[in-house]
Amino acid sequence: MTKASLSVRPVQTKSDLAAFVDLPFRLYAADPNWVPPLKDEVHGLLTPGKNPWFEHGEAQFFLAERNGAVVGRISAHIDHLALKQPAEQGMGPGTGNWGLFDAEDAEAAAALIATAEDWLRAKGMTRALGPLSISIWDEPGLLVKGFDHPPTVMMGHNAPTYQAWIEAAGYRFVKSLRTWDLDISHPFPELVQRIVAAGERNERIRIRQVNKARFNDEAALILGILNDAWSANWGFVPLTDSEIAYVGKKLKPIVYEDLVMVAEYDGVPVAFMIVLPDVNEKLREFGGSLLPFNWAKLLWWLRKPQVRTMRVPLMGVVKRLQSSRMASQLAFMMIEFIRRNATTRYGASRGEIGWILDDNQGMNAIADAIHSQINKDYWVYEKAL
């Protein structure tokens, strides 16, 4: 019997894109810890004109096929804002990316990665950094630890076999992005409580919740702080105004005023913390679609979600205060204020912070101080082309 031949081809039609989006639903059908994304959301992520990332990025999607059946997928992409970043911060000139990687077997994986590399070389790239699906702000990294429980909202999941396949293609580890798990059903350690209490007595500090009636202004304020706070971080690419509006629109349905805090010092906003109820706990029931009646179920749930887990996807302190005692105090205050609301109003008992870079000493120290434990680890790899 002859072995079936494998081919890799670019996504060109709407049906190709549908096959690209649909593949994980087959590959992970038996994985209890995979959360089916909403297909409309995935299509939006991949479509120029809908996702403003394409205003400064270009991408090509590929399908691997055997005997007419799709057995793998990958994206190859270049972010022109990332090319302008300092090389020592992870991106920089000549660095292209690949992601949205899924494969049925090692042969398909190798062919897909090689095809993505060829596309990047043809575009003049000299280094591949991945997986990023499709930017550092979406779902970066390959899950290498924490396969035994589902990811929280906006975090990725993949098969354990992928690590060996990527490393076999010549990639080396470059950065670890971790999430931290913690019990929020009881107060934090006494030292943290004293720090919070001291901040509450300081008239120069004000911790306020956001005002959803001024959502666009609040989103612009928060993401403006983010662009400053994260500007020296590994992998940082600034969010554009249109991306800020896009992210705000996507997050608005799951943003609750009492779960998002802004810290002001002498009347000036200097820090923020966003906490999201883990909508994945509900989306697991929907199979990737809001039709025919899942939209109504989701709208009802969103009125006042009751969840086990709250996730902290974004948190930042302006650069001028970083590495100061004030930065830690503001962080502890926002965490504690939101913890109280999350447990008493939403029934939450668990928190997840991250992702956090493995070398982000300040945030790792804060996570450790509130007795968190690393529960998931996502690796980013690189290879010279």
Image (cartoon, helix red, strand yellow):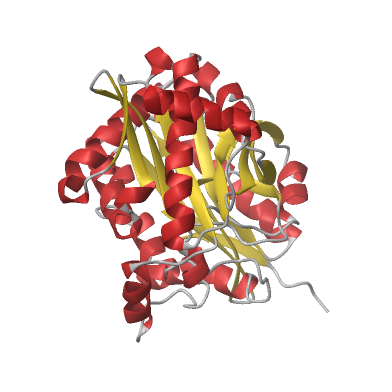
Q: Is residue 332 visible?
A: yes
Up-down relation of residue 308 to residue 49 (above or below): below
Give the vertical position of 331 relative to 266 (above or below).
below
Residue 111: name its quadrant: bottom right
* Quadrant of the rendered image containing residue 65: bottom right
Q: Position of residue 98 (x, y in %)?
A: 53, 44
**Residue 204 horizontal side relative to residue 278, left or right:** left
**Which quadrant, please, contains the C terminus?**
top right
- Residue at image position (59%, 39%) is 188
Q: Nearer the viewer, residue 228 or 2?
A: 228
* Residue located farthest toward the bottom when viewing the structure as drawn: 292
Asked whether 72 or 220 is in front, the reply is 220
Q: Quadrant of residue 377?
A: top right
Task: Pick whichever, 384 or 205, lies toward us.
Answer: 205
For the question of whether residue 384 can be seen, the reply is no
Residue positioned 42% across, 66% down in the render: 17
**Residue drawn at the location 62% of the way across and 36% of the way down:** 370
